[in-house]
């Protein structure tokens, strides 16, 4: 049973519902996918100068990553909100040439050569849609142009479809040491209804091949809350993953993007409704129970590792204080005091590269106390927030500012506060993004 949030001066919008069932009723909705503060938009005409200033700097964060975006997919999966362009071989070949040129324009600068990079992530889109020769060229170019640490994690994201042995071997030979594959579910019927082409048997065969090669870390994504997915199917998905003994797995909550294909398909009745938020909470808890029972190590709220081989460096570093160099149409990353986003329109991207310019479309300036907000977001992803330590680090009395809020959260069993450190309960884990966003919003309100 729940009631509306009680009046509490100006803090009431940061409070949870008063309820004895916080897992299902603490909040009415999920606020966002990732917690982040509000920043100041940068006028487009200023972007080239700011980028040049950053690239001329001789220092930066000791934690550094590179994100490379491949904006093509061989199909538009109904649940995905990141689709950009249909894959065409001729267009992909043109893109690879332009992307290599962008790498050449970026490399060789003082900033790039100041420190080594600990992680490189080929994301998308569907990077595995590219031909084997293109994957080889891109990975080899990164290794040639950019200083990488000896233990640099180089991830190739993709899907099972059209990811045959030839491509796998080419990626491994080029230097990929981590594969992140979007399985989403092993259930063939659900997969096909959502646009995933390969049946369960083929998915398992490919994953088994990767595992048995033993040459690179292999992880997968699974999504809970999909249309037609029962709790029993979700349990079977996790048990199937566990039986494969892969290196790691992300258990993601389904996000329904407004105006997206999934929302439209459900609205017109071609797909059954996805799980409700309360049902998703039950799926979440069951997933955690199964992973803990199998003694998997929790790296973040969503990610699990079988052994220490899986590190998930890019995901951890990108949520913390690290710098991230964005490369490719649709890529984004924080560098020093700014967020830069690379042009998502391929025509404009190609034109800028041809003219010898970094194809930036927009940017954001870090807000005041941004490192505090990133510390909060990072720690909450790990299940805690050490407010006492962060108060000292950032010279701000967080416990006083936040006490009315966190006292109420503790009352409804979302957190436990011990020695100035906030620890998430199981319901708090499910609502972790809401809680992190509210902490950030409450602090930013006074800045």
Image: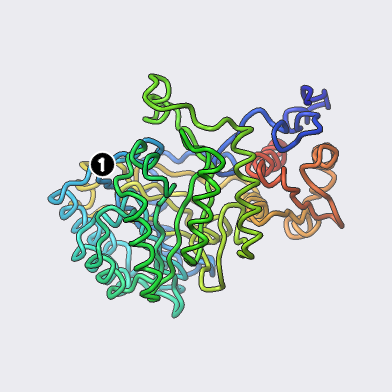
Image spot of residue 338 (x, y percent) = 49, 51
The residue positioned 46% from the left and 34% from the top of the image is 228
Check disc 1 and report its element: helix, strand or loop: strand
- Measuring from the top left, give residue 255's x and y in whole percent: 50, 37
Above or below — where is 341 with respect to 388? above
Which is more toward the observer, 384 or 330?
A: 384
In this view, the residue in front, 303 or 314, is 303
Residue drawn 49% across the image and 50% down it = 237
**Residue carrying label 1:** 85
Image quadrant in which you'd find residue 75 = top left
Residue 264 vs residue 194, the one in the foreground:
194
Answer left or right for 205 relative to 258.
left
User: Is residue 242 placed above or below 441 in the rendered structure?
Assistant: below
Task: Give whichever of 232, 363 is nearer the camera.
Answer: 232
Q: What colour scheme has been applied to the protein in the rendered image?
A: rainbow
Is residue 156 left or right of 133 when viewed as pictured?
right
Give the answer, above or below, for where 426 lies relative to 136: above
Q: State which quarter of the image contains the C terminus.
A: top right
* Residue drawn 35% across the image and 57% down it: 68
Q: Residue furthest bottom?
A: 150
Q: Residue 214: percent from the left, percent from the top?
A: 40, 76
Badge 1: residue crowd in 10 Å (few <14, some 14–19, many ≥20): some
Relative side of 183 to 248, left or right: left
Residue 8 horizontal/vertical position (percent): 83, 27
């Amino acid at each position: 049973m729940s009631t509306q949030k009680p009046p509490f001066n100006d803090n009431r919008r940061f409070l949870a519902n008063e309820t004895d069932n916080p897992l299902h009723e603490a909040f009415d909705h999920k606020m966002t996918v990732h917690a982040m503060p509000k920043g100041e938009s940068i006028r487009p005409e200023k972007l080239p100068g700011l980028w040049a200033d950053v690239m001329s700097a001789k220092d930066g964060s000791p934690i550094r990553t590179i994100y490379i975006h491949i904006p093509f997919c061989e199909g538009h999966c109904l649940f995905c909100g990141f689709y950009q362009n249909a894959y065409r071989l001729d267009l992909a070949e043109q893109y690879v040439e332009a992307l290599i040129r962008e790498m050449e324009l970026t490399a060789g600068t003082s900033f790039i050569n100041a420190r080594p990079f600990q992680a490189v992530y080929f994301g998308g889109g569907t990077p595995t849609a590219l031909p084997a020769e293109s994957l080889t060229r891109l990975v080899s170019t990164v290794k040639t142009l950019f200083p990488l640490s000896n233990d640099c994690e180089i991830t190739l994201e993709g899907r099972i479809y059209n990811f045959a042995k030839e491509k796998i071997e080419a990626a491994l030979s080029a230097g990929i040491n981590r594969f992140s594959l979007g399985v989403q579910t092993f259930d063939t019927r659900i997969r096909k209804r959502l646009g995933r082409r390969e049946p369960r048997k083929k998915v398992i065969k490919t994953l088994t091949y990767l595992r048995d090669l033993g040459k690179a870390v292999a992880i997968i994504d699974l999504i809970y809350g999909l249309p037609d997915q029962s709790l029993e199917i979700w349990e079977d998905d996790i048990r199937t993953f566990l039986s494969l003994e892969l290196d790691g797995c992300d258990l993601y909550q389904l996000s329904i993007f407004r105006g997206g294909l999934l929302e439209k398909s459900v609205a017109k009745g071609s797909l059954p409704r996805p799980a409700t938020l309360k049902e998703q909470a039950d799926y979440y808890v069951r997933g955690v129970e199964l992973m803990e029972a199998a003694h998997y190590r929790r790296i973040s709220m969503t990610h699990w590792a079988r052994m220490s081989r899986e590190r998930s460096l890019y995901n951890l570093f990108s949520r913390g204080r690290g710098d991230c160099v964005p490369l490719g149409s649709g890529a984004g990353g924080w560098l020093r005091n700014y967020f830069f986003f690379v042009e998502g329109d391929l025509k404009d991207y190609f034109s800028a590269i041809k003219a010898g310019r970094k194809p930036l479309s927009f940017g954001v300036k870090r807000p005041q106390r941004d490192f505090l907000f990133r510390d909060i977001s990072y720690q909450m992803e790990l299940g805690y927030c050490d407010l006492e330590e962060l108060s000292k680090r950032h010279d701000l009395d967080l416990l006083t500012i936040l006490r009315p809020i966190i006292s109420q959260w503790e009352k409804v069993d979302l957190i436990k506060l011990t020695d100035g450190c906030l620890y998430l309960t199981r319901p708090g884990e499910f609502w972790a993004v809401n809680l992190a966003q509210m902490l950030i919003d409450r602090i930013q309100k006074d800045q």
